[in-house]
Image (spheres, grey):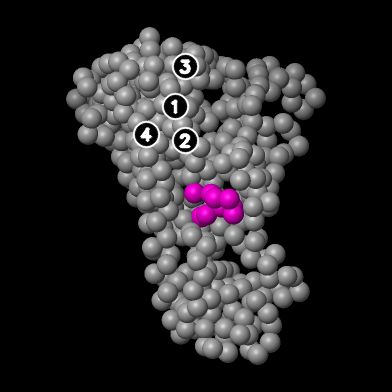
Amino acid sequence: MARVLTPRAEDFPRWYQDLIAKAQLADNGPVRGTMVIRPAGYSIWERMQAEMDARIKIAGAENAYFPLFIPESYLKREAQHVEGFSPELAVVTHGGGKQLSEPVVVRPTSETVIGEFMAKWVDSYRDLPLLLNQWANVVRWELRPRIFLRTSEFLWQEGHTAHATEEDARSYARKILHEVYEDFMVGVLGIPVVVGRKTNRERFAGATSTYTLEGMMGDGKALQMGTSHELGQNFAKAFDISYSAASGGVEHAWTTSWGTSTRMIGGLIMSHGDDNGLRVPPRLAPIQAYVMVVKDGDGVTAAAHKLRDALRDAGVRVGLDDRVDTAFGRRAVDAELKGYPVRIEVGPRDLAAGNAVVARRYDGSKTPVPVADVVGRVLAVLEEDQQRLHDEALAFRESHTVEVSNLADAIAATATGWARVPWSAIGVDGEAQANGQGVTVRCLVRADGSVPGSQEEPELVAILGRSY
């Protein structure tokens, strides 16, 4: 396997690109910065969607869909938003063979167009809260593309809500942050994210507060896995999202937005992948157990089919590989590259002894198991290895995070991981200095790890790192 992929320790970026290609996750699109997500990669995204969508709906939001094209004037009505996105915008000036009377923007995000319709749909306090989500594609013209991490077009979900009070909006933005995003990323992706507040310098254009979930990748760099924003009344005033209050007056709503994207697939690869390929956490895996016929004969294929059916009946997402015309070694390497959590190898010799071999992707171990015990063993392994992947990633993060007391030491520490440093020792000027050296304040947290209400709170801790 060492020569199938470039070893991570030798060249981490090359390993990442090798894995995406060899595991058949994605390919570069025909326009620079775009990507084609192949079935192996898209099936992972579908599982992410399903897990996230269920949590979003439990939080009370409903799915809708809004246009891909947004009038340029909409963005200009929210000045901070335009300033934040201008370098990334794709603008259409011609359509149907004619110059358009007004240019339209290919959506970079949908606060403005959704704000326009919220203004139409909200009349009374009884219409609030209005909780919307959409699964869509967006375009942000990327100068330095990297598949899944930074592409000019990517897939995501974006939530947009309107509330009667600032307190309700803040509560909902944090509900999404913890009960949807953190719960999914930790419990399903197995990635131990740090949840915190972005500095004023790093917050989303037009927001009053931005909350973030930061994951440490296998090279010690940070990846922003998702964000949730309080937008105050900025967009409500720009688009006149107002309502008749219970008291009888007319007031502007308070809005939020929040999103995660196919960037999470990149995070999955770089958090859990090893020199043999991808390792997909069992709760996420489209195929949790992969039954493989080693060699046909002596009832092997029939036994493999029975095991497949028994696993499926037990609620396991299962695949079957009975392609005996292809060398078993090649098929096993392919399964390892794709990261199937468990392989059940069924061959004549083991079957004659009443066994099948259970191979674990987490550590590469192989164990003969009586055929009658395979289902129970697989169920146990799936739970064990889900936890083991999380614990391994957490141990890596902790061993690559250092406590320092000043900016210089913090910047030095980011060569191999993250630094935790008192925010008071960094401040706005120190943050700008760090940015000049390719280091960012990933987030601010309280000493107990909770999310602060503002960057002016005393005794905050800043997490500094280099990032994707």
- The disc, 1 or 4, on the residue closer to the chain's N-terminal end is 4
Mark 3 closeness class: few <14, some 14–19, many ≥20 residues within 10 Å: few
Q: Are marks 2 and 1 in contact (CB under 8 Å)?
A: yes
Amino acid type of the residue that numbered disc 4 sits on in the rendered structure: Thr
* Mark earlier in primary sequence (2, 1): 2
Identify the mark nearer the N-term, 2 or 3.
2
Q: Residue at label 2?
A: 220
Q: Nearer the viewer, mark 3 or mark 4?
A: 4
Label 2 vs label 3: CA separation? 17 Å
Q: Which residue is mark 4?
A: 401
- Dividing the picture into quadrants, the one containing residue 246 is top left
Chain-order first, disc 2 or disc 4: 2
Between the C-alphas of marks 2 and 4, the distance is: 9 Å
Going from N to C along the chain, the mark reached first, 3 or 4, is 4
Judge left or right: residue 252 versus residue 157.
left
Q: Nearer the viewer, residue 326 or 36?
A: 326
The extreme top residue here reads: 429
Q: Earlier in the sequence, mark 3 or mark 1?
A: 1
Circle 4: is it few (<14), some (14-19), or many (20+) Cα within 10 Å?
Answer: many
Residue receiving disc 3? 435
Q: Is residue 279 left or right of residue 251?
A: right
